[in-house]
Every structure is written in structure tokens, then in C-alpha cells.
Image (tube, rainbow, N blue to C red):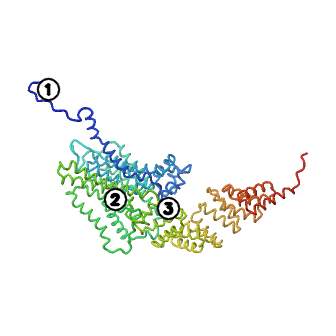
Amino acid sequence: MPPTNSSTPGAPPPPPPVAGTGRRGERFRVLLASPLLPALALLLLLFVAYIPALHAGYIWDDDSYVTQNATLLAPDGLRRIWMERSASPQYYPLVFTTFWLEHRIWGFNPAGYHIVNILLHGLSALLLWRLLRRLRLPGAWLAAAIFAIHPVHVESVAWITERKNVLSGFLYLAAVATFLRYAGIGGLSSSTPGGGAVRDARPLSMSWGWAVATALLFLAALAAKSVTSTLPAVLLLLVWWRRGSISARIWALLLPLFAIGAGAGLSTAWIEKHHVGAAGAEWAFSWAERMLIAGKALWFYVAKLIWPHPLIFFYPRWQIHHAPLGAYLAPLAALLVLLLLWLFRRRLGRGPLVGALVYAGTIFPALGFIDVYPMRFSFVADHFQYLASVPIIVLASVALTSLGRRLIPPPTATFAAPLLGALLLLSLGRLTYLQAKAYANPETLWRTTIAHNPSAFAAQSELGLILYRRGDLDAAAARFQAAIDLKPDYYEALNNLGIIENLRGNHQVAADLFRRALDVFPGYVPAWVNLGTAEYRLGHTAEAIAALREALRIFPDGAETLCNYGAMLAVSGNVTESAAALDRAADLGMVTAPSQLALAAAYLKQHDYPAALRHFQMGIDADPSNARLYNGKGVALAHLGRLEEAAEAFEKALALEPRNAEYSANLGRARRTLLRKPPPPPAQ
């Protein structure tokens, strides 16, 4: 039967035109249905929340990671980053490769490094959204948005040093995505048009390309931060959640990854203990005490995700020794929750149990069972839960979305649910914006930390260093003293206060402070060097030399220490060892005018004028504005009979210090000697 048109008698009138129909309206509907707008909205939220970070500078540890990292400047820096474990503060070669590349693009401009951190975090948020959509979980976009702008992540995003987190996090999530492809988990199918199925019955991908991609991304994530070593366990849990069993092919892929991850974790633990310095009384805990730390930390991080205020760079360090029995309820409660989720897995589904296990497994490296250096200041830190926050955020988003669908009737839910979600995201975004301001510069960070946690002894000491560099010695000394009052064995503050006392002329007080620091940590090289300076100023040359010798025993390649050591040896008359020390310093790239002056003067006393002349010239090359070096050079030249050159050297010394009577007298004698000198015989 032919179609009826509008002119056919008795036919119903055509429907009125609908606004937005036609090609333009169709394109608009396609645009609304595409993932482009939600992705752009996610990135917009992120960048608005992190506007303060775009204008921030460098803070704690950024010097050793970027601005004062000699490996980034070395011609063979890229090779050393990958081949030498000690070339960087931690062996995360992929992180330092990004810094190496960025330094060649924008130098030490902090804005570039901050932008890259924000972009990596944004890419992780987008990837998380796509993963949750593939897993057909409700509230996928909400979870990704919360992850993107939750204030607990400011420490990872706004702190350049924590490139470790944002880079490893992106690679970690990318590895999950490729694994889901390989395992055939997620995605829409004809049997589940709306999604939401608990069990995936799709076969594994026959292409090993996804498996290889998973392994490579996992290796890259480990090269950015070894906390990602827990990924194979997470992937096993995802398979068990969606399939109920784990095939031999999955085991074949994941068992080697387990071994690699365990090796990376053990390597990092060794580096933390033997290279970074996570060893000593501050890490001496029994297993029972470590269980207590772990239980408190598990609940602490969940609480900060639920109520992110206040967020502090250094949280108060819990008193673990001799804790009351009630404190052990925290780890017992965590175990009880896991037990209940297991017992009720048929009623609740395996999802909540898997989410809790993924959270516990991902946060495990930061729970205190493995000694890491930040435990010296606090057992918890916001950046420790960057990846571990994902399962908690996902569980909360799924619960909120599902609860909203049950409690809010459909007509009201059309506008109420987005409104409530917007209010939540605006609240989190505002907190993130305010928290990011604290990372503007070191002084702002430390003052903010002290305001929230006055017991933060490290913040007091770091603020003292800023005031010291500014020249406010009294205020700096007060901060160092405050740090010592809070922690009497804080050897860095003892050393720093000793430096100020040395500058004030209280050399004996300074020496006592340096010895107190060394009583706590005998291997602390700066305290040995500073003790040598204090002893020298007290007139105890032998004690000064002994202190510097001990510093060099601990760290033989300390170029500045070698210069000071060489200068003191020269003053004591030991020119042979002095010359050897200063030559070693020169080989390491450091030549200082004071040390060369001391050695050259010692050679003058021994009438070794050629050696004296050589070291005077080395000093001049290091500091052409030092008049004493030119005068000494002139004296050596005069003794060698090179009077014209001697006169030139005295003239340069006098030009630098016109009122110096000694230089003027030396120049006068050189000129008079030249006048009395008979002219050379005429050429034949």
C-alpha cells in the first residue's frame, strides 16, 4: 500500500514541526549523546580547580628532583637516569626522563612542569571514566569527576616532585584498560543492552597484542613509581568479580607480572633504607605496632575522602609506642568489614568486597609495613592514597547514584540528581582551589602547615631555612629552636641553628650543636663539615682537619669539603695532602679561590715559587676579583725574577684595592728594581 500523504482525502494532518529537527538538530542530538561534552566538562572542572597551581613555583624536594638535579644538566644525563641507581633521589627513571625532556623545552620555568602534572591527572580522570563505562557501572562520570577535583589529590598534582603519582597513575589505568580488552571484560552486548550485568561471559581476546600492551604499560608504571606493583592483584580481583573464576590464560599473563612487581617493590624498599635513609630508631616498630599503624591509616584515608578538611602537608605523627589496647580496634574493624563483605557477597554482590580489597591492596605499601622516609614526619600523607582513592570513590559514586534512583522519583530525578551532583562537585572544586593556593611557594606551604599542625617540626625547620636565606637570622634561629623543642633529636635543625651561632661568632655554642646533631646521626656529612669550620675558628686546626677527614670518609666526592680540607691542610703546612685534596676537588669540577690562596701561600713559605705561582693563577681563574691572589702572584713572579709580570700583577691588585698599602709597596719595589736593572746588551 502506498504511503499516505498530506493531500490524500481523509488523511490525518501532518504533525507540527519540532524545534531542532532536520540536519542541524540531528547533529546537535549526536553531539549531546557523544562523549565529547562530558569529557570537556571534566577537563574544564579540573583546570578551573587547579588555576592556583598554574602560577605556583617549586616547593620541598623540587630542588633535588628538578632545579638542583645535576643529572638533568649532564651531557650523559639520560643514560645515567636509566643506568645509575644513585643518579636521582629515587630510582624512577621514567619520571626523571620526563623532567630531562621538559628541561630542554622550558628550562626551569615551573609553569611547564605544573601544566604537565595537571594534564596527566586529567588524562587519568578521563581514562577512569571510560573504564567505568566499559564496566557498566552507574555514576561513572561522577566518579571520574570526583577523582579529578577531590582535594586530597592536590598534593599529588600541585607538587612537581609527585610527578611519580600522576604519571604512574595514568600508566596504571591504561594497563587496566588494555587488560580488560584482553580478558573480554566489560562493553555492551546484545544480551545485556542496558549494561549492569554482574557476570561477564565474553571469551578472552584471541589477540596477544592486548596482553603485551598490558605488560609494557605495567613495566612503564613501575618505572614511574613502584607502588603500582599491586596491579596484578587488582586485575585478578577484577576477573574474579566479573567472571567468578580465573582461567589458566589469565594466570599465564599475570604470574610473571606478580614476580616483576614483587622485585620492583623489594628494590624500592632497599633504596628507601640504604639510599634515601629510612632506617634507625624512627622506623623501629614491632609487628603489633605496625598493625596498629596500618589500621589507623586505613580508616584515616577513608575519612579524608569523606571529609577532606583539614588537609595538611605534615599530619601529626601518632604515638604508637605503648598505645592503649583500644587503639587496636582500628585494624580489627578493618578485618571485620572485609569478613562481612565476604559473608554477604551473594546478597550485596562481589563488587563491594572487590572494591574494599582493591583499596586495601593498593594502599598496602603505604601502611607502615615497608619503611619509607616520609614516615619520619608522619605515618600518613595525602599523596600516599592517590591510586588507592579510586575504589573508594567508585564505590561511593555507585552507591550515591543507585540510592538516588531509588529514593528520587523519575520526574524529579531529571533535574534533582544533576543538581545534587553539581553541588557536590562545586564544593569539592572550591576546596581543591583553596588547597592548591597553599602550594604557591615554600613559605606559604610551611606557614599553612604550621597553622594546622603546630607540632610539625620539619615545617618549622624548613621555614627557618627560608628566613635564614633571607638574612633574618633571629627569626630563623627561633624557628630552628622551635623545631628542636618539638623534636630534640632533629639533627637537621641542630645543624642549622649551629650555622647561625657560627655566624654570630658563638663558635663554641655552634660546635656543641654540631656534636649534638652527630650524636643523633653520625653519618650526617653537613654537621661534620660545619664542625670543622667551628673548630678552625676556635683555633683548633687539628680538630678541624679531623672533622673534615671524617666527612670525606663518609662521602669522598664532596668537592666543597675537599676544598675546605685542602685549605686547612695548607694552613697547617701539609702542602702535599693539601695539593692532593684540591686536585681531587678540581677533578670533580670545583676550584675555589680561598683554598687555592691558602695552598699557594703555603708553597710561598716553602720557597716553592713555581708551585705557588700555579695555584695563585688557579685561584685567579676561579675568582678574578680577588686582589690577594694577584698580589701573591706578583710576589711569586718577583722571586722568579719576572719583574715586569710581577709589576703587572701588583697593578691589578692595587686596581682592585687602591688603598692597600702592602700592594702599593710591592708595586713600588718592583718598579724600583726594574729601574736599577741594567738594560739588555744591544743586538749584534
Q: Residue at x 24, y 60 (%)?
A: 342
Sequence-wise, which precedes: disc 3 or disc 1? 1
Of all residues shown, which one is farthest toward the right? Answer: 684
Q: Is 29 drawn above or below residue 656 in the view shown?
A: above
Checking the image for residue 275, the label placed there is: 3
Q: Nearer the viewer, mark 3 or mark 1?
A: 1
Sequence-wise, which precedes: disc 1 or disc 2? 1
Image quarter (top left, top right, bottom left or bottom right) of the C terminus: top right
What is the x, y in percent for residue 125? 34, 49
What is the x, y in percent for residue 509? 57, 74
Closer to the camera in the image, 232 or 126: 126
Neighbor class of circle 3 (other Cα within 10 Å; few <14, some 14-19, many 20+) is some
Q: Quadrant of residue 575?
A: bottom right
Q: Nearer the viewer, mark 1 or mark 2?
A: 1
- For the residues labelled 1 and 2, say whether their Cβ atoms are less than 8 Å apart: no
Task: Give the residue type at disc 1.
Answer: Ser
Task: Give the residue type at disc 3.
Answer: His
What is the x, y in percent for residue 120? 40, 49
Q: Is residue 44 visible?
A: yes
Checking the image for residue 6, the label placed there is: 1
Checking the image for residue 361, the label placed there is: 2
Sequence-wise, which precedes: disc 3 or disc 2? 3
At mark 3, the secondary structure is helix
Closer to the camera in the image, 600 or 32: 32
Closer to the camera in the image, 57 or 214: 57
Q: Is residue 219 visible?
A: no
What is the x, y in percent for residue 140? 28, 49
Task: Give the residue type at disc 2.
Answer: Gly
Neighbor class of circle 2 (other Cα within 10 Å; few <14, some 14-19, many 20+) is some
Neighbor class of circle 1 (other Cα within 10 Å; few <14, some 14-19, many 20+) is few
